[in-house]
Amino acid sequence: MKNVRLAFFLYFSYVSVGCIASQLIPLINDAGYTAFEKSMILGGGALFSFLMSLWLGKKSDGQGRLKPSFYISTSLYIGFMILFYLIDSMLFKAFSLIGLIGVSRTLMSSCETIVLMAKPDNFGKYQSMGALGLISGSLLSAQLMPVGKGSLCILSSLISFFLIYQWPEKQKEKTEIKVQDFLLLLKNKEYIGYLMIFFFLMLMGFADQYIVVDKMVQLKASAGMISLKYALQAFMEIPIYLSIKKIFHKFSISKLLVFCTLMSALKFALYGFVSVSYMIIIVSLLQIFTHPIIVVLSKKLIVGCTPSYLAASSQIIGFAVYFGMSGFVASLLGQMLTAWFSFDTALYIFASFALFPFLIWYFMRKYGKVGVVIKNENISD
């Protein structure tokens, strides 16, 4: 029963996130913001996510519990949602969007970390429920009026809040996290190397959400088509999450990392090549070879190179860097590139960023910055 509760907790949390994430670019465009204002909103949301993640990571390890971080993120998410739909001022809507973007990422990070700490052996299976939540949220959001979108987000957030409130969390030993502990993470070259690798991979992932969707808008794609792209990408992740233990048992971490990096580059090269919306949706199905593998790799590699007393901090702060800051850079860089060049050229440039993970991984392997996790590359738990 506890397993079912945890699975549906993740499902409803991701329904709430999917409602907004799938329609984020159309929401900003419909509100009438300029390209510069849009980049400030997207970048501001990513920066807010980064700062909030630092605080929540410290708080989680300091209390020895993860649930309070989820409560804070969910409460703020609901609050920003209400402000966005109730206040007409473009300035307040902009601040609400920044809050929604930032808090949605810390909310996802809190949910993933709760599941990872509770069920490390079955993390992939639980993530499949999260993917189903993203599918449900994105498809429903496209069919609802603005008030309906907000109501669905709030309702699903409250359900997930109730489900995790009733779930017994194991109390970890409380650890007072000091500045020296954060400096310890920053001095960990293996940890920093992994963050850099996943920063560039997630940078490409955010370009998928921002620049690719902007290209679809330019091609006159409907909100329904944009939601379909988001939903299909989430759907393609499910078989990978369900079979992730077999995949990690059969293939080494090195091979998986190289493979998903190559597929990320291929996906963006094809995004730049095609010129109709339905072809973009078909190309987006390559998500099956990219995001789910990247997510699980990031969790496993960070767990393997950081001390246990910083388990929550290393995950949440790492998530803030490679997920939060990559979103900040992707939004600003994307707007600059599309202003200077065409959408297609911008996408080709983002495809070329796949070179950086290759180089970082090569030098980490060559100069011995890869630790115990790689000594058993067929790690599956």
Image: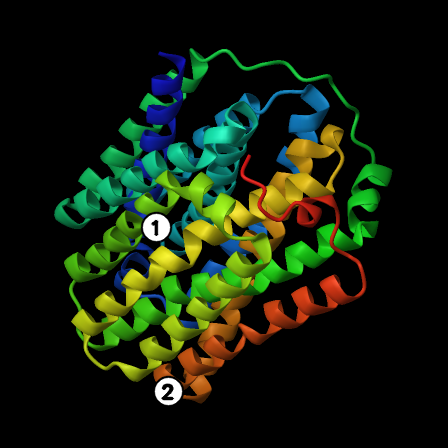
- The answer to whether residue 217 is above or below residue 159 is below
Asked which quadrant contains residue 137, the reply is top left
- The answer to whether residue 107 is above or below residue 199 is above
Residue depicted at 29% across the width and 64% down the height: 284
Element assignment for label 2: loop
Work out how far the residue at label 1 is from the one at label 2, CA to CA, in angstroms.
Answer: 24 Å
- Residue 269 in the image: x percent, y percent? 38, 79
Residue type, label 1: Ala
Q: Name the residue under label 1.
A: 21
Image-based side of 336 in relation to 364, left or right: left
Mark linked to residue 342: 2
Q: Which colour scheme is used?
A: rainbow
- Residue 1 in the image: x percent, y percent? 35, 11
Q: Give the residue at the far front of this rendering.
A: 250
Image-based side of 256 in relation to 361, left or right: left
Crowd tier of the residue under label 2, counting other residues whose Cα lies within 10 Å: few below 14, some 14–19, many 20 or above: few
Element assignment for label 1: helix
Residue depicted at 29% across the width and 55% down the height: 233
Asked which quadrant contains residue 7, the reply is top left
Mark linked to residue 378: none
The mark that comes first in sequence, 1 or 2, is 1
- Residue 374 in the image: x percent, y percent? 68, 50
In the image, 213 versus 332, the foreground residue is 213
Q: Is residue 370 in view from this perspective?
A: yes
Residue type, label 2: Ser
